[in-house]
Amino acid sequence: MNIARTAGLRSLVTLAALTSPLIATAADVTGWYLGANVGRSLAKIDDARISSSLLGSGFASVTIDDDDRDAGYKIFGGYQFNRYFAMEGGYFDLGKFGFAATTVPAGRLNGTIALKGVNLDLVGRLPLTEKFSVFGRVGVNHAQARDNFSGTGAVAIADSNPRKRDTNVKFGAGLQYDFTDAFGVRAEIERYRVNDAIGNKGDVDLASIGLIYRFGAPAPRAVEQVAAAPTPMPAPVVVVPAPAPAPVPPTATKISFAADALFDFNKATLKSEGKLALDKLANDLKGTRFDLISIIGHTDRIGSKAYNLKLSASRAEAVKTYLISQAGISAAAIATKGINGDEPVTQPGDCKGSKPTKQLIACLAPDRRVEVEVTASR
């Protein structure tokens, strides 16, 4: 029984070349990881060789039915040296394939092969966006081939259960999407070069999808990268202008909230502590005639400006929506704006470094804020 080559793997080189300018700037992720894939394996049974062998043994004709598909899986672990390269090893089971040959004079030859083993690969990864990447692999596999043959009628079998272990190459390519720095999903196709137990070489392809888990990775991963520790809700800092002589013109009052007190890290949904702080502001604003309320969201300098602008604007909108519902303020009286880190509170040199470490995240906390400026008169 021979396992022959199937359809070739489609190259991802062109896709990588076209999209490489989109690679996001992210910190290197290193360390150990585990994963598992399950999918469909495919082989091509060498019907021509089987027919030739039987016809050469004196049979007048041969018809063959193939069973060339099965379920396959693999369990793997590896070490990520940096965001581009990893070493990966594991156990695979490609499934079982077989054929049934009917002969004249009357007889039947049945054959199956089961393939499983271990592998060691070098994996190269190319990030296309912050979460999406392509990867390729090349390595070796050490597989055990377990053949089983049976014959009826005019077909006689000399060795019904040959076995063989051998080492050959393997390679593959795939796509990966990371939900967080710790957890992702893969889809890939691999080709295993294998030997059967009676001296023939061939290929088996495994197309599969699976999950990967990294140990010690910060989560969740976002543009700001490292999740900051929960920050106690500070009291709002209120700057009250000096009283003006009568007649009293509209006054401007600015209130600054720490973004970490209103929102979970890298989120734009108000948390319960943030709602309590805004409830106090809403109560103070009741009974006031508003000329304008300006809400400005600020981020720190970590991450891309486009992402930070979207996050800061979403946070400002969340505060606006809450004040409308709690203080009965008209939406037309509130203006919102997002600023992408270009107006920091910290001074140059206060927080050194560019890599998003926990220390840098904590140092830049004053820059992450929501400012509410009320221009109103009693």
Image: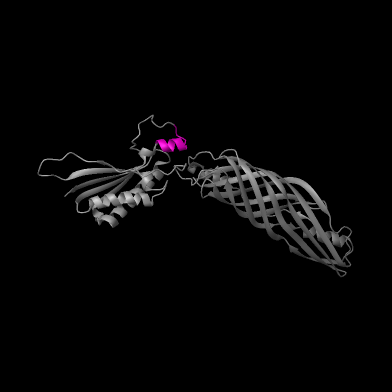
Asked if residue 24 can be seen in this view, the reply is: yes
The answer to which image quadrant residue 331 occupies is bottom left
From the viewer's perspective, is 204 left or right of 20? right
Q: Position of residue 194 (x, y in %)?
A: 75, 50
Q: Closest to the observer: 18 or 287?
A: 287
- Residue at (82% x, 53% y) in the render: 163
The answer to which image quadrant residue 249 occupies is top left
From the viewer's perspective, is 258 left or right of 249? right
- Residue at (77% x, 63% y) in the render: 99
Q: Position of residue 229 (x, y in %)?
A: 44, 42
Q: Closest to the observer: 342 or 371?
A: 371
Numbered circles on residues, count: 0
The residue furthest left is 246
Asked if residue 7 can be seen in this view, the reply is: no
- Give above or below for 25 relative to 55: above
From the viewer's perspective, is 357 left or right of 80? left
Q: Any magenta on residue 327?
A: no
Q: Quadrant of the N terminus?
A: bottom right
The magenta segment is: 353-363
Q: Any magenta on residue 361?
A: yes
Q: Position of residue 181 (x, y in %)?
A: 52, 45
- Give above or below for 99 relative to 7: below
Q: Closest to the observer: 224 or 227?
A: 227
The residue furthest bottom is 106
Q: Position of residue 302 (x, y in %)?
A: 42, 39
- Residue at (64% x, 46% y) in the render: 77
- Give above or below for 51 relative to 187: below
